[in-house]
Amino acid sequence: MVWTAGKLCGAVGLMLCAVTGMVRADTSFWYDKARLADFRAGIFCLTDDKYPVKEPDTMSGEIDIYNDTPIMVRETRVIPALEQIAFGTEERSLADEDIELLITIEHPALGRKQMRRESWRSSLVQDSATSDFFIIGLSDGDPVGHWAITGSENGRTLFRVNFEVVPPKPGEVSPCIAEMTS
Protein backbone atom coordinates (compact mmCIF):
# COMPACT_ATOMS: atom_id res chain seq x y z
CA MET A 1 0.00 0.00 0.00
CA VAL A 2 1.32 3.46 -0.83
CA TRP A 3 1.11 6.01 1.94
CA THR A 4 1.94 9.67 2.17
CA ALA A 5 3.06 11.51 5.25
CA GLY A 6 4.58 14.82 6.27
CA LYS A 7 8.25 15.69 6.74
CA LEU A 8 8.02 14.50 10.33
CA CYS A 9 7.87 10.90 9.10
CA GLY A 10 11.20 11.26 7.32
CA ALA A 11 12.85 12.68 10.43
CA VAL A 12 11.30 10.44 13.06
CA GLY A 13 10.64 7.28 11.10
CA LEU A 14 7.59 5.71 9.49
CA MET A 15 6.84 3.47 12.47
CA LEU A 16 6.23 6.37 14.83
CA CYS A 17 4.03 8.11 12.26
CA ALA A 18 1.93 4.99 11.76
CA VAL A 19 1.48 4.66 15.51
CA THR A 20 0.44 8.28 15.93
CA GLY A 21 -2.03 8.09 13.03
CA MET A 22 -0.29 10.66 10.85
CA VAL A 23 -0.22 8.39 7.76
CA ARG A 24 -3.03 8.47 5.19
CA ALA A 25 -3.77 6.83 1.85
CA ASP A 26 -2.89 8.73 -1.35
CA THR A 27 -6.17 9.29 -3.22
CA SER A 28 -5.02 12.29 -5.23
CA PHE A 29 -5.80 12.99 -8.86
CA TRP A 30 -4.56 15.30 -11.59
CA TYR A 31 -5.70 16.06 -15.12
CA ASP A 32 -4.54 18.32 -17.95
CA LYS A 33 -7.08 21.17 -17.90
CA ALA A 34 -5.82 22.38 -21.28
CA ARG A 35 -6.83 19.06 -22.94
CA LEU A 36 -9.75 17.83 -20.80
CA ALA A 37 -13.00 19.68 -20.15
CA ASP A 38 -14.13 17.42 -17.32
CA PHE A 39 -12.55 14.72 -15.20
CA ARG A 40 -14.14 12.65 -12.45
CA ALA A 41 -13.28 9.43 -10.64
CA GLY A 42 -15.53 7.01 -8.80
CA ILE A 43 -17.82 3.97 -8.84
CA PHE A 44 -19.87 3.03 -11.91
CA CYS A 45 -23.03 1.00 -12.49
CA LEU A 46 -22.90 -1.03 -15.69
CA THR A 47 -25.36 -2.68 -18.04
CA ASP A 48 -25.12 -6.12 -19.63
CA ASP A 49 -24.99 -4.63 -23.16
CA LYS A 50 -21.30 -5.15 -23.94
CA TYR A 51 -18.90 -6.87 -26.29
CA PRO A 52 -15.29 -8.04 -25.83
CA VAL A 53 -12.23 -6.54 -27.55
CA LYS A 54 -8.83 -8.23 -27.45
CA GLU A 55 -6.29 -6.36 -25.33
CA PRO A 56 -3.24 -8.58 -24.67
CA ASP A 57 -1.79 -6.46 -21.84
CA THR A 58 -4.69 -7.28 -19.48
CA MET A 59 -5.21 -10.23 -17.10
CA SER A 60 -7.93 -11.79 -19.26
CA GLY A 61 -6.49 -10.73 -22.62
CA GLU A 62 -9.57 -8.65 -23.41
CA ILE A 63 -11.69 -5.75 -22.21
CA ASP A 64 -15.43 -5.17 -22.50
CA ILE A 65 -16.81 -2.24 -24.46
CA TYR A 66 -20.22 -1.12 -23.18
CA ASN A 67 -22.85 0.06 -25.67
CA ASP A 68 -24.65 2.11 -23.02
CA THR A 69 -22.83 4.87 -21.18
CA PRO A 70 -21.87 3.65 -17.70
CA ILE A 71 -23.31 5.79 -14.92
CA MET A 72 -21.01 7.10 -12.20
CA VAL A 73 -23.05 6.66 -9.03
CA ARG A 74 -20.48 7.88 -6.52
CA GLU A 75 -17.52 10.21 -6.92
CA THR A 76 -14.88 8.70 -4.66
CA ARG A 77 -11.34 7.38 -4.68
CA VAL A 78 -11.83 5.02 -1.75
CA ILE A 79 -13.34 1.81 -3.11
CA PRO A 80 -14.75 -1.10 -1.06
CA ALA A 81 -13.37 -4.47 -2.19
CA LEU A 82 -16.71 -5.89 -3.34
CA GLU A 83 -17.29 -8.49 -6.05
CA GLN A 84 -18.02 -6.90 -9.46
CA ILE A 85 -17.73 -3.29 -8.29
CA ALA A 86 -16.58 -1.08 -11.17
CA PHE A 87 -14.41 1.96 -10.50
CA GLY A 88 -12.38 4.31 -12.63
CA THR A 89 -12.50 7.58 -14.53
CA GLU A 90 -14.82 9.63 -16.69
CA GLU A 91 -13.27 12.27 -18.90
CA ARG A 92 -14.33 14.63 -21.70
CA SER A 93 -11.95 16.13 -24.24
CA LEU A 94 -11.48 19.77 -25.23
CA ALA A 95 -9.77 18.76 -28.51
CA ASP A 96 -11.27 19.38 -31.93
CA GLU A 97 -10.67 15.74 -32.85
CA ASP A 98 -10.80 12.34 -31.17
CA ILE A 99 -7.85 11.43 -28.93
CA GLU A 100 -6.39 7.93 -28.81
CA LEU A 101 -5.46 7.06 -25.23
CA LEU A 102 -3.36 4.42 -23.56
CA ILE A 103 -4.93 3.55 -20.21
CA THR A 104 -2.52 2.05 -17.69
CA ILE A 105 -3.65 0.65 -14.37
CA GLU A 106 -1.33 -0.30 -11.52
CA HIS A 107 -2.69 -2.49 -8.72
CA PRO A 108 -1.79 -5.20 -6.18
CA ALA A 109 -0.66 -8.53 -7.69
CA LEU A 110 -3.74 -10.22 -9.20
CA GLY A 111 -4.64 -13.17 -11.39
CA ARG A 112 -2.80 -16.35 -12.29
CA LYS A 113 0.19 -14.34 -13.49
CA GLN A 114 0.14 -12.03 -10.42
CA MET A 115 0.01 -8.99 -12.72
CA ARG A 116 0.62 -5.59 -11.16
CA ARG A 117 0.19 -3.51 -14.32
CA GLU A 118 -2.32 -3.67 -17.16
CA SER A 119 -2.97 -1.43 -20.14
CA TRP A 120 -5.45 -1.05 -22.97
CA ARG A 121 -6.39 1.36 -25.74
CA SER A 122 -9.26 3.82 -25.34
CA SER A 123 -10.59 6.84 -27.24
CA LEU A 124 -11.77 10.23 -26.14
CA VAL A 125 -14.50 11.00 -28.66
CA GLN A 126 -15.00 14.69 -29.34
CA ASP A 127 -17.91 16.20 -27.33
CA SER A 128 -18.60 12.91 -25.48
CA ALA A 129 -17.72 11.56 -22.07
CA THR A 130 -15.49 8.48 -22.02
CA SER A 131 -15.30 6.04 -19.10
CA ASP A 132 -12.33 3.83 -18.31
CA PHE A 133 -12.72 1.50 -15.35
CA PHE A 134 -11.77 -1.76 -13.70
CA ILE A 135 -14.22 -4.37 -12.40
CA ILE A 136 -13.08 -6.20 -9.28
CA GLY A 137 -13.25 -9.97 -9.42
CA LEU A 138 -12.42 -11.37 -6.00
CA SER A 139 -11.42 -14.71 -7.55
CA ASP A 140 -8.40 -12.87 -9.05
CA GLY A 141 -6.92 -12.32 -5.58
CA ASP A 142 -6.98 -9.72 -2.84
CA PRO A 143 -7.54 -6.29 -4.45
CA VAL A 144 -7.01 -4.31 -1.22
CA GLY A 145 -4.30 -1.68 -1.58
CA HIS A 146 -3.13 1.17 -3.77
CA TRP A 147 -4.38 1.49 -7.37
CA ALA A 148 -3.54 4.10 -9.99
CA ILE A 149 -5.11 4.77 -13.38
CA THR A 150 -3.22 6.87 -15.93
CA GLY A 151 -4.41 8.06 -19.34
CA SER A 152 -1.79 9.15 -21.84
CA GLU A 153 -1.63 10.29 -25.45
CA ASN A 154 1.61 9.50 -27.32
CA GLY A 155 3.51 9.30 -24.02
CA ARG A 156 2.03 12.56 -22.63
CA THR A 157 0.01 12.09 -19.43
CA LEU A 158 -3.51 13.56 -19.66
CA PHE A 159 -4.71 12.30 -16.29
CA ARG A 160 -3.71 10.22 -13.28
CA VAL A 161 -5.85 9.20 -10.35
CA ASN A 162 -4.94 7.21 -7.25
CA PHE A 163 -7.47 4.93 -5.58
CA GLU A 164 -7.35 3.03 -2.34
CA VAL A 165 -9.28 -0.26 -2.35
CA VAL A 166 -10.25 -1.07 1.22
CA PRO A 167 -11.96 -3.99 2.99
CA PRO A 168 -15.75 -3.49 2.89
CA LYS A 169 -17.59 -2.57 6.06
CA PRO A 170 -19.73 -5.38 7.56
CA GLY A 171 -22.92 -5.68 5.48
CA GLU A 172 -21.73 -3.18 2.83
CA VAL A 173 -23.04 -3.77 -0.70
CA SER A 174 -22.27 -2.15 -4.03
CA PRO A 175 -24.06 1.20 -4.50
CA CYS A 176 -25.48 -0.28 -7.74
CA ILE A 177 -27.19 -3.10 -5.80
CA ALA A 178 -28.35 -0.67 -3.11
CA GLU A 179 -29.91 1.57 -5.81
CA MET A 180 -31.74 -1.34 -7.45
CA THR A 181 -33.28 -2.51 -4.17
CA SER A 182 -34.42 0.88 -2.87
Image (cartoon, rainbow, N blue to C red):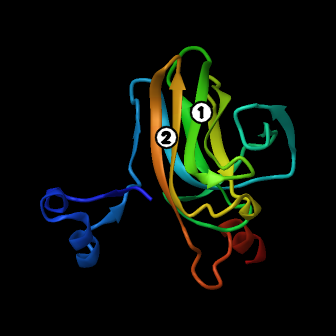
| Residue for badge 1 | 103
Residue 100: quadrant of the picture: top right
| Residue 42 marker | none
Which callout, 1 or 2, points at the residue further toward the start of the chain? 2
Q: Amino acid at mark 1?
A: Ile
Question: What secondary structure is marked by label 1?
Answer: strand
- Quadrant of image for the N terminus: bottom left
Q: Amino acid at mark 2?
A: Phe
Q: Please indicate whether residue 27 sits to the left or right of residue 20 in the image.
A: right
Q: For the residue carrying disc 1, how many other residues have a C-alpha within 10 Å: few (<14), some (14-19), or many (20+)?
A: many
Q: What percent of the width, then of the height, locates residue 180?
A: 77, 70
Q: What percent of the width, then of the height, locates residue 181?
A: 77, 77
| Residue for badge 2 | 39
Examine the rendering and report whether any part of residue 58 can be seen.
yes
Question: What secondary structure is marked by label 2?
Answer: strand
Q: For the residue carrying disc 2, how many other residues have a C-alpha within 10 Å: few (<14), some (14-19), or many (20+)?
A: many
Please tell me which residue is depicted at 38% across the width and 50% down the height of the picture: 28
